[in-house]
Image (tube, helix red, strand yellow):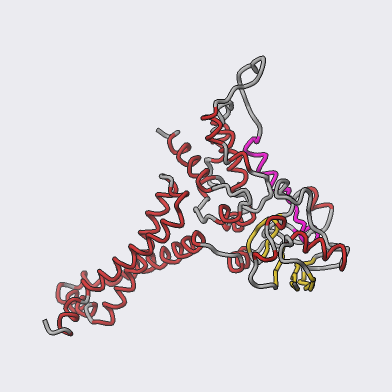
Amino acid sequence: MSETAKKIKTFDQKDWVKENLSYHKDSGSWAWIYHRITGLALMGYLFLHIYSLSTLTSGKEAFEAKMKTFLSPPLLALEWLLFVFVLFHSLNGIRVVLVDWADGAKYHKALYRYSWIIGIILFLAMGFVMFSHEIFKLFGK
Amino acid sequence: MKVTLSILRFDPEKDEKPYRKDYEIDVDPSFRILDCLDKVKWDIDGGLAYRRSCSHGICGSDAMMINGKNMLACQVLVHDFKNKYIKIDPIPSLPIIKDLIVDMESFFAKYDVVKPYLIAKSQPPAKERYQSIEDRAVIDEAVNCILCGACSASCPSLWTNDSYLGPAAMLKAYRFVFDSRDDAANERLDVVDSPDGLWRCHTIFNCVEVCPKEINITWHLSQLKKKCAMREF
């Protein structure tokens, strides 16, 4: 605490949780918050991924049976959702690199918008690739 | 027109912790928020404390958090706000001395660390240290800082880490590192090239959003980051 603060009673309003929750947020803050959340979620997924591969140690049949469950539509949908996290984290990662190493700081809001647009396009494209079998079946091709 | 100012009050002699108090006042839509505070202080409650000097966006005294965002009270008008219930708080994270006045000691201690003065190793010429128009253009934006503290107090990295230098101090580092007359760039880069310096900037852009002088602080920090990284090669 500073000399001035020692002489008179002051109120320490420091509370980073409250500050983060109550302070006004613009695109930059949202990008940072989503980047943190998706980063942590992807780290959690990494452990899940390694766990799901652990059947490799109990032979080919066990592994293939496990992989088959991952191809069921609900799990495929979850995997599609995972792609949202991957997309945001990687596209925003590129945005951050451009901000730090190019002149991106001057266009950070446009970069944020572009990453959303590119992300949504790639998300839909991935959905088409993942569910093409179901889509073709639905429209009788 | 009626507006309600909801002001965070704290009197160190009476209060244990701050509390909110509402003041309904009759103002003109073209009033600045600072004029509204003056009206409260002059007509309703003389005990209200806030900093104010030039009241024209030059001195940087009246940075405060208005509706959850740091700004200068003398630079925003009542009609800038759709909702006429306006919340006014001191800028976040710094200790409150009284009402809207915060203790800026830590802010200026960090400012001192980057050596915010010209360090020229050569003898001064008879007339002046000449700087070309092109060389000056490099620091044109950075010299506009008025040290209001709105940027540093809006930085989530600083909220969680007291020792982080913060945007204002590092902007000042840029101002001298990129000054063609200065000879101490390396000394300053040593200070900012640390875990509590540049590398804790996560490009959240809160500082850029609030700067009353519209300085793109994050861009200036990115130039410093590049300069620090290039020193390694």
State yes or no: residue B109 in magenta: yes
**Quarter occupied by residue A59:** bottom left
**Quarter occupied by residue B20:** bottom right
Closest to the observer, A133 or B164:
A133
Relative to B204, is A103 on the left or the right?
Answer: left
For residue B118, say whether it is visible: yes
Residue furthest left as drawn: A141
Residue at 41% across, 66% down: A38
Percent of width and height locating residue B94: 70, 56
Residue furthest top as drawn: B126
Quadrant occupied by the C terminus of chain A: bottom left
For residue B13, say whether it is visible: no
Percent of width and height locating residue A140: 13, 84
Residue at 58% across, 49% down: B214
Relative to B112, is B209 on the left or the right?
Answer: left
Q: Is residue B55 above or below residue B23?
A: above
State yes or no: residue B9 in magenta: no
| Total number of numbered discs in the rendering | 0
Relative to A120, is B72 on the left or the right?
Answer: right
Q: What are the residue bounds of the magenta stretch? A: B96-116
Percent of width and height locating residue B12: 84, 62
**Quarter occupied by residue B31:** bottom right
Percent of width and height locating residue A114: 38, 59
Relative to B175, is B45 on the left or the right?
Answer: right
